[in-house]
Image (tube, grey):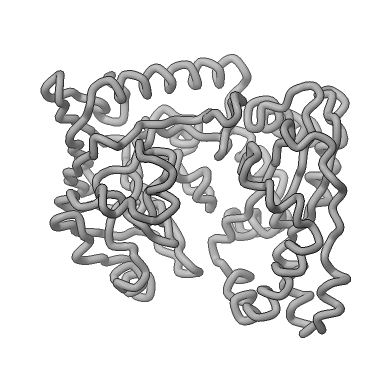
Amino acid sequence: MKKIIEEYINKVLEFGCNIQNGDSLVVTSMMNIDELKKAVLEVKDKYGINQLIFLDQDRIKLYKFLKSNPKEEEIKQYVQHLPKLKDPHRTKILYAIDDDYSSSYRNIIDNYKKLYGIYDHEDYQTNKEFWSTFNEKCVTLFTWPDEHWAKSLLGSEDDLDKLWLLINQTIPDRSELLDIIKHHKEIRRKMNELAIKNLHFYTQSGTDLSIGLSDKSIWLSEPTTLNECEYFYNFPSYEIYTSPDCNTAEGKVSVIKPSHLDGKKINYANLKFEKGKCVSAESDNEKWNQTVMNENNHLTRIGEIALVSKKTPIAKLNRPLNSLLLDENSGCHLALGNSIDKCIDLPESILNEGKKMDYGFYNSSHHQDLVFGDDSVTVEAETSNSGKKLLLENGRWKI
């Protein structure tokens, strides 16, 4: 198993955050960081890392601490003191996330919002220099198998080795991954050149959706670029995605993969759209339906649409992985809620002021990914300069 873990972390470092000789690296985790720390230390010399910082953000540990009803002075002492970054301009951040499909700890922590707010405030004050520059760095989100995930997906904490074997299959070997990246860059280029006005999705499982794009919509794929550095924000990623005109969706969507929203898990859902708005949501969780349809949550319009072929390494596994970061790469999907700013060709001043709704892009604090693409998914585009164009047919790229 040590070899599997080393292979995985090498892929994450080389491709995910594109670590270069002389870079500084911050490694952080929402789970117990011990095993991740051990894996990074095993391979760090290979990459010539200038400075290595481990930041423990274990949600379960924080929950237990907050549950003890600590005093403000205890919270100050609990906060980690991070060292000063040697080279802020060459710092990359590796962030192991836990989607927590049951959201069990997230819900419990919500009961301690006041203390959690105090903790966040003290953390920022203590490490102001670090957190003030966090969003300017290359941040790579990825998953790290642990006992909690093994139990939720496979039934037992003893299945961790099986989970590692499964997750390692989500990233192919080096040569195949390079081919995928090259292919997706070419697809992205072609789709931006097509000047797509409208997309139509069909699946045998019931999706029949038409949605328009704005002339400000930009198609993207991973890796992305920041400060002339190419890296993955989500790793792995096999989607070609954009933010559509949120006022245009018409038709129905049949969600075929599990998803979760604020602790409310669904296994399937059926959505109906009229004039861009979701007018009905039916799933196996009535609380989820109510959350989506509640106008105050701003989840009734589409902020992202993504094309994914049935040939991705994750789609080939043909099973849910209880991680949205991974499961969204198993098929075409949409996201209810916030549009993606980097997919919008508008000045930052407009985006920062939250005025993107004026241009047909949705503004929300939520971004709920829902997979509807099965092996039969077919996507047709209506373009400004090439008429109708088939993009996917029965899950295979046609562009």
Most extreme residue toward the left, as rendered? 387
Q: Residue at x 47, y 45 (%)?
A: 327
Q: Is residue 236 placed above or below 65 in the rendered structure?
A: above
Q: Nearer the viewer, residue 46 or 48?
A: 48
From where the camera sits, is residue 383 visible? yes
- Describe residue 325's horizontal placement relative to residue 186 as left or right: right
Coordinates of residue 305 in the picture (x, y in percent): 32, 42
Coordinates of residue 159 in the picture (x, y in percent): 69, 51
Q: Nearer the viewer, residue 162 or 246?
A: 246
Q: Residue at x 60, y 54 (%)?
A: 154
- Describe residue 65's horizontal placement relative to residue 354 as left or right: right
Question: On the image, which quarter does residue 121 sit in?
Answer: bottom right
Q: Residue at x 86, y 79 (%)?
A: 73
Coordinates of residue 26 in the picture (x, y in percent): 77, 42
Q: Is residue 63 placed above or below 252 in the rendered structure?
A: below
Q: Nearer the viewer, residue 347 or 13?
A: 347
- Describe residue 12's horizontal placement relative to residue 224 as left or right: right
Most extreme residue toward the front, as rendered? 349
Q: Is residue 290 placed above or below 2 in the rendered structure?
A: below
Instruction: Look at the image and tell me in which quarter the N terminus lies.
Output: top right
Instruction: Look at the image and tell me in which quarter the C terminus lies.
Output: top left
Question: On the image, which quarter does residue 217 sit in?
Answer: top left
Q: Is residue 381 placed above or below 130 in the rendered structure?
A: above
Coordinates of residue 386 in the picture (x, y in percent): 15, 19
From where the camera sits, is residue 285 visible? no
Question: On the image, which quarter does residue 195 sit in?
Answer: top left
